[in-house]
Image (cartoon, rainbow, N blue to C red):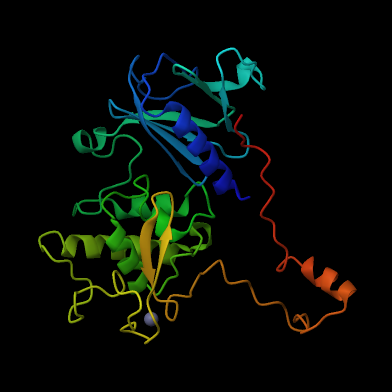
């Protein structure tokens, strides 16, 4: 199970225990940001890579980043905690449960509406729809993205990087760049990061006033790949694909023909002379399966767990 899957599973458990219930108590000794109000209800729990966010009905969002040390546990009120109290960073109590976050290096809260009142305040990235948006700041946030394994197609929707990029835009931006939506953000160089931000900004601003989105003038419908699954790519003639991805299960469209660049799912080519034979001897097969490019290292995340 990957790290993302573990956090995803934790988020599901927290959602079941917390969402819709008035909060009895909230404690976070090292919290940076405003406190959610007593009696407020948790509306949403979402995960993204090693990030976990809890959103209250008064608009406060708490962002916790697990890095390598953090974990969330769920306990009944009379249950003994499996870690020391001094490792507690957050404790949220509702009627039947206490959700406890231990050792997370990042625990911060912010109000969702602050970005409208105070642009530049809080944790949200610049709004790419604004002509004055600091694109350099967005490029920086792409390059310093906390989880290098997250695909660029998810990073584009992360408002901590930039605001304004929607689901249609991300597919179109990546097609325009001939970049795989599955390229890990950590694998992108400065040029790709800059091109991604600039293309997104250009596309968003060009479509601010139009009721119908046009990213490729002349193409029927105005879009290169979005909504065009099964149709031929206007650039290379390959068939446009669609897939549900990410926490929100949003549709992602791309052309595998001309958007293979950076695809981290394509295994690297073995060095010359190390090609895998058609039918190896069992000992050879064992040796080959242990080569770094053939090894599957999915299950190396013992840290985050849920009681
Ligand atoms: Zn194509």
Q: Residue at x 28, y 70 (%)?
A: 227
Q: Quadrant of residue 264?
A: bottom right
Q: Quadrant of residue 7?
A: top right
Residue 206 in the figure: left or right of residue 265: left
Question: Is residue 244 depicted above or below 48 in this figure?
Answer: below
Answer with the quadrant where ligand 1 appears in the image.
bottom left
Name the residue rendered at 28%, 39% in the picture: 120
Q: Position of residue 95 (x, y in %)?
A: 44, 16
Number of callouts: 0
In this orientation, which residue lies closer to the viewer: 227 or 83? 227
Relative to 57, 78 lies left or right: right
Q: Is residue 244 left or right of residue 263?
A: left
Q: Quadrant of residue 278?
A: bottom right
| Residue 97 versus residue 274 in the image, above or below | above
The residue shown at (48%, 40%) is: 51
The image shows residue 116 at horizontal and vertical percentages of 20, 38
Residue shown at the point (16%, 63%) measured from the top left:
207
Identify the image quadrant of the C terminus.
Answer: top right
Q: Position of residue 288 (x, y in %)?
A: 80, 72
Q: Tell me if residue 124 comes above or below residue 204 in the rendering.
A: above
Q: Residue furthest bottom?
A: 237
| Residue 211 screen position, x and y as percent | 10, 62
């Amino acid at each position: 199970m990957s790290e993302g899957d573990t956090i995803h599973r934790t988020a599901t458990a927290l959602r079941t225990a917390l969402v819709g219930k008035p909060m009895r108590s909230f404690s976070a000794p090292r919290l940076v940001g405003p406190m959610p109000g007593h009696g407020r209800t948790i509306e949403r729990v979402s995960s993204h890579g090693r990030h976990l966010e809890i959103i209250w009905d008064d608009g406060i969002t708490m962002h916790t980043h697990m890095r390598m040390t953090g974990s969330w546990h769920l306990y009944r009120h009379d249950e003994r905690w499996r870690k020391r109290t001094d490792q507690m960073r957050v404790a949220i109590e509702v009627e039947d449960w206490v959700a406890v976050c231990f050792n997370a290096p990042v625990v911060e809260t912010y109000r969702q509406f602050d970005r409208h009142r105070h642009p530049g305040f809080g944790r949200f990235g610049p709004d790419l729809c604004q002509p004055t948006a600091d694109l350099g700041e967005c490029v920086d946030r792409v390059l310093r993205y906390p989880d290098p394994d997250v695909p660029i197609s998810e990073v584009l929707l992360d408002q901590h990087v930039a605001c304004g990029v929607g689901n249609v835009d991300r597919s179109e931006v990546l097609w325009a760049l001939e970049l795989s939506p599955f390229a890990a953000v950590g694998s992108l160089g400065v040029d790709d990061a800059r091109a991604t931000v600039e293309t997104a900004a250009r596309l968003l601003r060009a479509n601010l006033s139009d009721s119908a989105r046009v990213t490729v003038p002349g193409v029927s419908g105005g879009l290169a790949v979005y909504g065009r699954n099964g149709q031929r790519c206007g650039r290379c003639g390959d068939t446009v694909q669609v897939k549900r991805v990410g926490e929100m299960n949003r549709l992602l469209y791309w052309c595998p023909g001309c958007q293979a660049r950076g695809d981290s799912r394509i295994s690297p080519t073995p060095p010359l002379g190390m090609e895998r034979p058609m039918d190896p001897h069992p000992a050879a097969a064992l040796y080959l399966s242990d080569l770094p490019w053939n090894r599957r290292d999915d299950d190396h995340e013992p840290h985050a767990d849920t009681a």
